[in-house]
Image: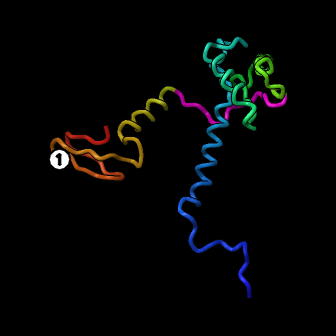
Amino acid sequence: MAASRMQVPDVLPLGSVTRAHWDVMQTNGEAGDFVMYRNEFVDNSSELSPYGRDHIQEIAARMPSTPFPILVQRSWNNADPELDQVRRDIVVRVLTDLGNQDANQRVVVSQPYSNGLNSRESELDFARFRSRGFGNGGGGGGGGNGGGGGGNGGGGGGNGGGGF
């Protein structure tokens, strides 16, 4: 019986299994660049903030080479759909004026792909990051009274501390 051409090889090339995962994460991250958040508008208005003006110019420059929709973050609990629509119309007009003729088809009012963090969650994440280092759950460390070493997951102890 002949082997099928669609058979999975016994040994896959190095990195081929994880590459697809990383590509998906990169694509999702890039799609997140095309979200106009509420804080990119001045208070409860449709006027773009200085950051919003800069961001919409970046979006306009990248639109022709990407397939992503442009999301305009809706108001809290969808409380003001009229404002959301006016903001969408402003974004469409600016993107069209900057040379993107398909802006009307690509701009939608929606929630962003991921939820943001409140100040307390951000503070906890920052503290966790500082205590664990840049990755893999730990850092070398050591020194001081009883400090240990350690590679992945190791950590200092005593008065020497680990990580940073």
- Residue 80 coordinates in the image, percent (x, y): 76, 19
Question: Is-magenta flag for residue 80?
Answer: no
Residue kind at label 1, given as amino acid type: Gly
Expressed as whole percent of the image width and height from the top left, the position of residue 17 reads: 58, 60
Write the residue at 65% across / 72% down.
Answer: 8
| Residue at image point 58% right, 31% down | 116
Please provide percent x and percent y for residue 15: 54, 59
Farthest residue, direction bottom = 1
Q: Residues within 10 Å of mark 1 (few under 14, many from 20)?
A: few
Q: Residue most toward the left?
A: 145
Span of residues in magenta: 105-118
Q: In the visual, does 92 lie left or right of 8?
A: right
* Residue at 36% across, 53% down: 152
Residue 97 drawn at (x, y percent)? 79, 17
Along the viewing direction, whichever of 139 and 117 lies nearer the viewer: 139
Q: Answer with the quarter of the image where residue 38 lies.
A: top right
Nearest the viewer among 113 and 20 is 20
| Residue, disc 1 | 146
Q: Nearer the viewer, residue 25 or 124?
A: 25
The quadrant holding residue 55 is top right
Q: Is residue 15 above or below residue 142?
A: below
Q: Quadrant of the N terminus?
A: bottom right
How many labels, in total?
1
When the figure is inspected, residue 48 is found, relative to residue 23, above or below; the finding is above
Picture colour scheme: rainbow
Q: Is residue 130 left or right of residue 84?
A: left
